[in-house]
Image (cartoon, rainbow, N blue to C red):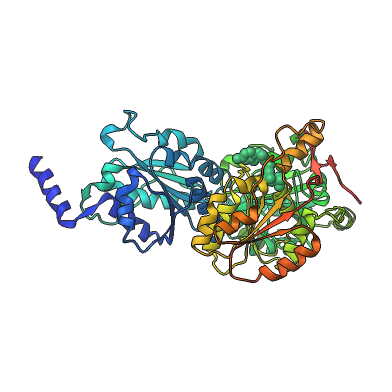
Amino acid sequence: MVQEAALKEKKSQATGLSGADLLLKALEKENVEVIFGYPGGAVLPIYDKLYDSKILHVLPRHEQGGIHAAEGYARISGKPGVVIATSGPGATNIITGLADAMMDSLPLVVITGQVATSVIGSDAFQEADILGITTPITKYNYQIRDTKDIPRIVKEAFYIATSGRPGPVVIDFPKDLAAALTEELQEQEISLPGYQPTIEPNLLQVRKLAEAVSKAKRPVILAGAGVLHAKASALLKQFAEQQKLHVVHTLLGLGGFPAGHELYIGMAGMHGCYAANMALYQCDLLINIGARFDDRLTGNLKHFAPNARVAHIDIDPAEIGKNIHTHIPVVGDAREALIQLVRQDTKPPEQDEWVETISTWKKDFPYYYENTDVLKPQKVMELLYEKTAGEAIVVTDVGQHQMWAAQYYQFENADRWVTSGGLGTMGFGLPASIGAQLADPSACVIAVLGDGGFQMSTQELAVIAEFQLPIKIAIFNNKTLGMVRQWQEIFYGSRFSHSKNPVQPSFVKLAEAYGIKGYQINSEAEAQSVLDEVLNNSEPVLLDFRVDADENVYPMIAPGKGIHEMVGVKK
Ligand SMILES: Cc1ncc(C[n+]2csc(CCOP(=O)(O)OP(=O)(O)O)c2C)c(N)n1
């Protein structure tokens, strides 16, 4: 035994490789191009190796910014976002991002530093039980206990993050193992007997669904982000066109089907359009592809698609029947399911009356606002859409501006939309736009933010300045926490409890302090000319749009109400 250990030690010294080296080698093997990381004591052995690494390292100015940037990167690139945070406070600073990525099914591989194995459990300096804390908000988590496991664990982490329903994976890495010398290890196979995601759908179920389509009188497709994760937009279009089926999107699914297509109805849900919500209410066949029947979509479950047979295609069997009774479950990848569905090529349903009804709803009840001399947020969003020909990547924060972006930016293409849907995380937008721009450097990236969410993330202006990322930061500045103010106005008798920002810095001067050009915009005419000036240039810019503070987002389904009980619908 003693001899064996001595031999191992000798071999390790001969290679000169540490646990941190093995980690970086494994990351390189996964073709990692960028790491969003923040150093600290427990990850110093890793940072020492990063000093010589080819991988681009982006230093956010707060770990939460780093993980949101990784989410933006993952959403646009389709590759996992990689994050490093130190133990204790570094790791706890990324918790919100993990929960956010878990809710929105974004693939992340997150390496957290941990105290040395000899002191784990002793309340050592900067120790936090990251496995315990992150278990409910990760797809999986690991703690490295032996350097020989590093290549396998990294390989498995990338596989788990990206396969099946994507999600975040944490690797907790004790400092002593990162520093320890080790042998060069050979390629290791992954070993996950308990994790076998179903990709190919059951053909009998697909046939059942195809039959149901051919018999339907009022069919509608509800397409969620699963279509985007599966890279299935082209197939969705093919299937919808083949069967003449109308499509409704969830908030996260926007761009999966072209907004200008005659079969597109619009976004459904709490602030969705009248036609989309009514189509879900009155349909007799609902084909859910890659959406999870979230409560902000369905409203009161009692009134959701009450007369419909429900088909649900989802890669995660846990989603089927979770909120809505499902008649035709199809477990599998959306892309594979659509390939099979298109192959069935059954006779399209007879639905003339339904098509007519949908078209009347679309024509008679579009999104509506009254334009006045005060700059309207909806007008700003329309201008952003028109002046980028619908081709920008739009990244939002959370609040009213997020809903106006979803309503007024017409996405023709997939993977142009980044928003925090499930967790609704303020402070997400600005850092996520950094990741989106790094994933697609030539794209026009617009960060649509509220003044509240922007102030939760202003430190990340430093990253935008450092890398000269040409992000157009559009702040919808209503000097209030607008969505909270809206709810207080409607449901709490206009008692605006702590929802007005009492002090606000000059956003233009703040941008200038980072060397970023800033503009304050007070009218539609100014908006027109400033946007013409800045949208095509290759520099970062901050646009402080002073928008109407009293504007509300409509239509709206109040909490507890059914999907057909929208208020604020105008003809
Ligand atoms: C981290 C976090 N805290 C609180 C909230 C609750 N919340 C949802 S929207 C909102 C107001 C957002 O205000 P602002 O960023 O100015 O955007 P606006 O609604 O005015 O467009 C708040 C406080 C949240 N979603 N996230």
Above or below: residue 328 compared with residue 240: above
Quarter of the displayed picture in which ligand 1 can be seen:
top right
Q: Nearer the viewer, residue 107 or 551?
A: 551
Q: Is residue 550 left or right of residue 77?
A: right
Question: Looking at this rendering, what residue extends furthest in the left direction?
Answer: 3
* Residue 326 locus on image (x, y percent): 68, 41
Q: Residue at x 51, y 39 (%)?
A: 137
Q: How many marks?
A: 0
Q: Specify the quadrant of the image occupied by residue 116.
A: top left
Q: Residue at x 25, y 47 (%)?
A: 179
In the rendered image, which quarter contains the N terminus?
top left
* Residue 297 locus on image (x, y percent): 72, 43
Above or below: residue 167 compared with residue 509: above
Q: Is residue 56 left or right of residue 97?
A: left
Q: Nearer the viewer, residue 104 or 524?
A: 524
Q: From this viewpoint, is residue 336 visible?
A: no
Q: Residue at x 61, y 41 (%)?
A: 423
Q: Is residue 449 left or right of residue 43?
A: right
* Residue 499 locus on image (x, y percent): 71, 37
